[in-house]
Image (cartoon, rainbow, N blue to C red):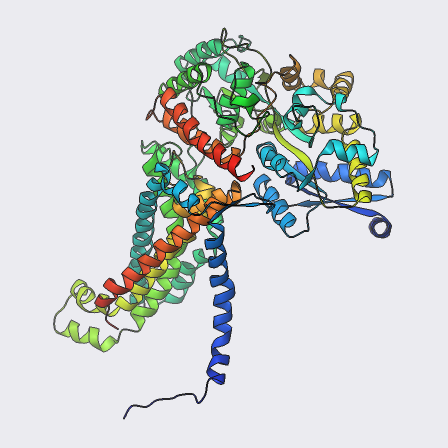
């Protein structure tokens, strides 16, 4: 017989749920509602007047070819950040999982970069890759490679991807390691006795069993790449050269907080919200089917 | 000794704090740290010590953009300071916010502190003055672009470091010589839009935007795709292609290269003087910004960058009285002369410039007078008073993008500037809509 624990009445469950509901309402629903409301106006920065423009802000944005181009930039950027940070983290986690001695030290060191704020991480990477005085670009120069991310679009994109992924590797590493350690050793040993080599074991046993973790990280990392990377972009490239690294969230930030165009900024947040919402639904509908819990 | 210093500090703290209770407090939000922050704090201390009715309290609110945002957010919450520092790019935003600001000329008239608008340098105050001559905000730190020359690099390349560099034609020849002499980095610049388009336009007396560069109305359109500007950007693009102009970034990244002695010529704000002087281990001098011989009415005058002090609305008369006294104090010759000599920023009054000259500062520090001369050589015209464009920060971003396309060889100068105009005009129309 199925064992079920249920509450009698409504009061207690509501009380227990309330804190989470209040937090979500205050920090998510209210600001999101405000953004939707503001996106229908062109306000002046000081809040002295609001001009109703209906969907005018959206028309203005979607009619701008440069704004439409930044959808592609964002897709490329998010994909690269997600793949880089998850791929590298998985590699490190597999290595750390096999360690017998000193694994604690490795784990601690690998987690550190997560504590570095994105904008600070941006400055660190910028120093290393500064076109003239950076350490890395100097060594590249010795090898005969002329690093110049202020004019070369691909190099600029590469640099912001690396800087955005770096701190994320730590976060992903943590989850992958926990996931790996939750896989029963007996399953792997059985496969080893059957003669399966490491790669075969990884492909047929470890990776499928890790899929819930991978799926969770996929969702979280895409959300990260979409929303939290403007600090890195702001410090390293300001969206340049030309528009090579202008991703959607950077434009929200710079239009709203640097240029005080609050109507356009609000409309952009709404667009971003819709995209990420749709993306998450797609992920749950199509990718989650392939996840084994 | 130590105890006495401590006691002294304690006593003065008590004196200051008891002072603060009796006196009216004036909040000043600013964007300065480091050396500039110290000099600003000294000005405040000096003012507070000079009288007992008012206490000015300075608060650092981050960089220019962050300070402006802090001021705006505070105004929305009804907690705005009396005085807010706003960079020149934010001028149109502040001007359009009629209910949020109190124009300086009004504050001074009501407060009764001595104020003579004619004492201020025309080219400096012009940026912050209406077409009717009313001063809206008080210029605080103002600088203008000049040309820095690494004399050692010229000698190393076999050129005469005293050669005439007043025109871009001559600079072009110098760049040829430098390149031929093995110089890797003949020319770098800081703030490309400010130096090579905004100031270029004023210096040649050609419009950057219609309606007197936006002074005469919000229905202004960009005009920086005119023949003078296109010719200049084309020449710069060619120099970039030939490795004679090295692009280092949108802000003042090139300063690090020049100060390290890696580059021969550098177009940068006159306020960069202190940094160059402190770090340069080579012989350098300062020249006027070059102009194209035969183009426009060059040399006209260059325009400023920097910040001004805006008085926010919503405070009582007593506080405004204090503000007017403080602004009057800041405009005094001694304060201005000291500020000018310590920072490389321009003095805001003619008297302060004369005082600096009389003190022999220019003779002891050759090159520091160049910026002032460049600004005051001719009376400003409609094209050289300054710029008053909404969303100007974003427009500069667009200009940066388009110029990068030229430096990378992806677009020619005309196409890039036409596109910058078109994209910038869309933002100007939006700003007009928001502030109608």
Residue B399 placement: quadrant: top left
Residue sticking out furthest to the left? A194
Q: Is residue B413 left or right of residue B378?
A: left
For the C terminus of chain B, give its image quadrant. top right
- Residue B39 or residue B331, whichever sits in front: B331
Which x, y percent locates residue A163? 40, 47
Q: Is residue A63 left or right of residue B174?
A: left
Q: Is residue B172 left or right of residue B272?
A: left
Residue A166 in sight here:
no
Which x, y percent locates residue A111? 42, 60
- Residue B61 or residue A139, whichever sits in front: B61
- Residue B355 or residue B53, whichever sits in front: B53
Q: Residue at x 51, y 24 (%)?
A: B261
Which x, y percent locates residue B403? 41, 26
| Picture layout, residue B263 above or below residue A240 | above
Please give the count of numbered marks on the rendered protein: 0
Residue B225 placement: quadrant: top left
Q: Residue at x 50, y 63 (%)?
A: A27
Which x, y percent locates residue A185? 25, 75
Residue B5 in sight here:
yes
Q: Is residue B58 left or right of residue B71?
A: right
| Picture layout, residue A13 above or below residue B160 | below
Residue sticking out furthest to the top? B294
């Amino acid at each position: 017989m199925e064992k079920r624990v249920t509450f009698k009445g409504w009061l207690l469950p509501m009380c227990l749920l309330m804190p989470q509901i209040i937090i979500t309402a205050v920090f998510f629903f209210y600001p999101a509602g405000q953004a939707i409301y503001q996106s229908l106006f062109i306000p002046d920065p000081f809040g002295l007047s609001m001009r109703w423009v209906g969907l005018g802000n959206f028309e203005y944005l979607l009619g701008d070819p440069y704004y439409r181009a930044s959808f592609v930039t964002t897709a490329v950027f998010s994909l690269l950040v997600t793949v880089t940070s998850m791929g590298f983290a998985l590699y490190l986690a597999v290595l750390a999982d096999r360690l017998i001695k000193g694994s604690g030290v490795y784990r601690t060191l690998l987690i550190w970069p997560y504590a570095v704020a994105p904008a600070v991480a941006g400055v660190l990477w910028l120093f290393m890759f500064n076109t003239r005085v950076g350490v890395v670009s100097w060594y590249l120069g010795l090898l005969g490679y002329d690093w110049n991310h202020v004019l070369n679009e691909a190099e600029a994109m590469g640099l912001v991807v690396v800087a955005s992924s770096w701190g994320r590797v730590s976060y992903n590493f943590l989850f992958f390691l926990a996931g790996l350690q939750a896989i029963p050793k007996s399953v792997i040993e059985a496969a080893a006795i059957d003669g399966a080599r490491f790669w075969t074991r990884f492909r047929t046993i470890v990776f499928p069993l890790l899929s819930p973790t991978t799926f969770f990280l996929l969702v979280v990392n895409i959300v990260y790449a979409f929303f939290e990377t403007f600090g890195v972009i702001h410090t390293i490239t300001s969206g340049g050269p030309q528009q090579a690294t202008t991703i959607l969230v950077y434009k929200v930030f710079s239009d709203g907080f640097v240029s005080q165009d609050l109507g356009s900024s609000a409309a952009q947040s709404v667009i971003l919200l819709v995209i990420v919402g749709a993306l998450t639904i797609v992920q749950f509908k199509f990718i989650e089917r392939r996840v084994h819990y | 000794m130590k105890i006495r210093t401590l006691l002294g500090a304690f006593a003065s703290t008590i004196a200051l704090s008891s002072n603060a209770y009796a006196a009216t407090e004036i909040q000043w939000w600013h964007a300065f740290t480091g050396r500039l922050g110290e000099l600003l704090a000294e000005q405040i201390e000096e003012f507070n010590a000079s009288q007992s009715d008012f206490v000015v309290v300075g608060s650092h609110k981050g960089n220019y953009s962050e300070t402006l945002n802090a001021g705006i957010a505070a105004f929305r919450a009804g907690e705005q300071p009396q005085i807010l520092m706003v960079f020149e790019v934010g001028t149109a935003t502040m001007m359009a916010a009629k209910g949020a600001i109190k124009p300086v000329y009004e504050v001074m008239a009501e407060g009764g502190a001595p104020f003579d608008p004619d004492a201020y340098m025309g080219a400096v105050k012009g940026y912050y003055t209406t077409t009717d001559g009313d001063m809206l905000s008080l210029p605080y730190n103002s600088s203008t672009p000049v040309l820095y020359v690494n004399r050692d690099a010229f000698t190393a390349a076999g050129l005469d470091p005293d050669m005439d560099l007043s025109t871009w034609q001559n600079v072009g020849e110098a760049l040829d010589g430098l390149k031929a002499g093995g110089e890797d980095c003949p020319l770098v610049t800081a703030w490309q839009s400010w130096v090579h388009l905004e100031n270029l336009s004023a210096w040649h007396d050609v419009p950057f935007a219609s309606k007197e560069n936006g002074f005469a109305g919000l229905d202004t359109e960009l005009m920086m795709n005119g023949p003078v500007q296109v010719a200049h950007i084309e020449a710069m693009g060619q120099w970039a292609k030939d490795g004679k102009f090295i692009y280092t970034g949108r802000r003042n990244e090139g300063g690090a290269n020049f100060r390290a002695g890696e580059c021969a010529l550098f177009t940068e704000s006159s306020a960069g003087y202190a940094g160059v002087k402190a770090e340069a281990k080579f012989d350098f001098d300062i020249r006027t910004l070059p102009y194209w011989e035969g183009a426009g009415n060059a040399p006209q005058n260059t325009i400023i960058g920097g910040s001004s002090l805006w008085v926010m609305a919503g405070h009582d008369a007593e506080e405004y009285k204090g503000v007017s006294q403080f602004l009057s104090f800041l405009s005094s010759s001694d304060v201005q002369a000291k500020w000018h000599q310590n920072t490389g920023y321009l003095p805001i009054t003619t008297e302060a410039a004369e005082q600096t000259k009389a003190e022999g500062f220019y003779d002891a520090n050759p090159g520091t007078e160049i910026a002032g001369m460049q600004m005051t050589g001719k009376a400003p015209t409609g094209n050289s008073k300054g710029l008053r464009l909404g969303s100007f920060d974003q427009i500069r971003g667009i200009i940066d993008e388009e110029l990068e396309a030229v430096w990378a060889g992806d677009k020619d100068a005309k196409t890039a500037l036409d596109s910058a105009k078109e994209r910038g005009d869309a933002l100007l129309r939006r700003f007009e809509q928001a502030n109608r």
